[in-house]
Amino acid sequence: MTQTILGGGGTIGTLLAKELTEYTDKVRIASRKPKKVNPTDELITCDLLNVNEVIKAVEGSAVVYLTVGLEYKAKVWQRDWPAIMRNTMEACKAANARLVFFDNIYMYSPNHLNGMNEETPIDPVSEKGKVRAEIARKLMEEVKAGLLEATIARSADFYGPGVGKNGIMRQMVVENLAKGKKANWLGKLDCKHSFTYTVDAAKATALLGNSDKAYGEVWHLPTAKNPPTGREWIDIFARTMGREGKVQVVGKILLRILGLFMGVMYEIVEMYYQYDRDYVVNSDKIEKAFGIRPTPYGDGVREVVREVSVQ
């Protein structure tokens, strides 16, 4: 039973390929420049913006995972995400394959971020959030119409193994502390902020893809309860690394200034609201349905520090 990962070269796609070996010995990775994760992986070169290439990549698949990560620019998301979702749905219909969409939580209302669950109101204020809301809506419309079997797996910002130096926690906190510099933190230090552990996200995504009861639903991926505040996140990492937990708070004005020189900072401005209030993800639904528990934050931090120390 072939299971195909579209956009398999990123953090989640790579970890997912490892986890899928628990369910199948036929893992296919499709991307612009696919690389093997497991010795037996099948590789297919595919441009997700080309519907014919997507149809070919998905052909013969039982389950398809859409885990692609686009350049972090609103204009790119507006241009490419609708086409990618449309092509993926068409390919899955042609192959009679099930679809698992690895999603984020940008579409939720800024007024309901403390205790977000699968029923949180969808009312995005960012351009990137509007894109995510629209493609998720179109996917679930196809599901409700009986035209496609699919499920949505939603993750908070993530941290953990496989996250490169561009990951927000890695870039702003871990790398700076490792160099003896001040950690940076967006928004308010006293606000709680959930992060999903990458291994938990990959394991749960594989589980959802191979569980009949998962389809037709939206699921928050396992995310530990009682998240640290910004100040506590920095203290946890600093203690674990044996560093001093000095911090520089990056406010909205400074973020705009940095955005003049660093494109990614400009793109973060519209997401600033996620850091000036409590941002807490609830994953009770998947935990209760499948009897799984997320990795405690302390354990996750130790694994991140271990990975950084050996690189």
Image (spheres, rainbow, N blue to C red):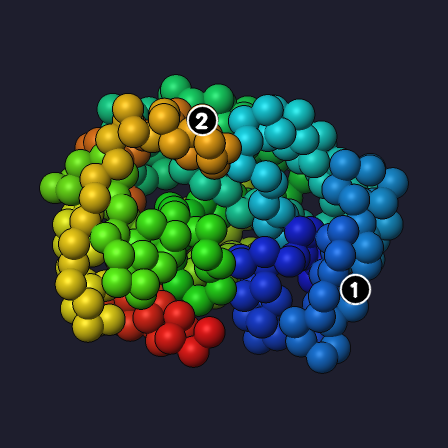
The circle on residue 171 is: none
The percent position of residue 195, horizontal first and vertical second, equals: 32, 51
Q: Is residue 263 above or below residue 75?
A: below
The image quarter containing residue 159 is: bottom left
Q: Secondary structure at mark 1?
A: strand
Q: How many marks?
A: 2
Among the two numbered marks 2 and 1 on one chain, the one whose residue lies closer to the N terminus: 1
Characterize the local packing of mark 2: few (<14), some (14-19) or many (20 or more) Cα atoms within 10 angstroms: few
Task: Please tell me which residue lies in front, 171 or 226.
Answer: 171
Residue type at the position of mark 1: Leu
Residue placed under numbered mark 2 in the picture: 260
Q: Tell me what residue is drawn at x 47 percent, y 51 percent.
A: 166
Q: Quadrant of the N terminus?
A: bottom right
The percent position of residue 254, horizontal first and vertical second, equals: 29, 29
Left or right: residue 212 compared with residue 97 = left
The percent position of residue 174, horizontal first and vertical second, equals: 32, 60
Task: Please tell me which residue lies in front, 23 or 178.
Answer: 178
Q: How far is mark 2 from mark 1, CA to CA?
A: 39 Å
Q: Secondary structure at mark 2?
A: loop
Characterize the local packing of mark 1: few (<14), some (14-19) or many (20 or more) Cα atoms within 10 angstroms: many
Residue type at the position of mark 2: Leu
Q: Tell me what residue is drawn at x 31 percent, y 65 percent.
A: 178
Task: Please tell me which residue lies in front, 137 or 263.
Answer: 263
The percent position of residue 186, horizontal first and vertical second, equals: 27, 38
Asked if labels 1 and 2 touch by Cβ distance under 8 angstroms, the answer is no
Residue placed under numbered mark 1 in the picture: 43
Q: Tell me what residue is drawn at x 19 percent, y 67 percent.
A: 243
The answer to whether one can see residue 40 in this image is: yes
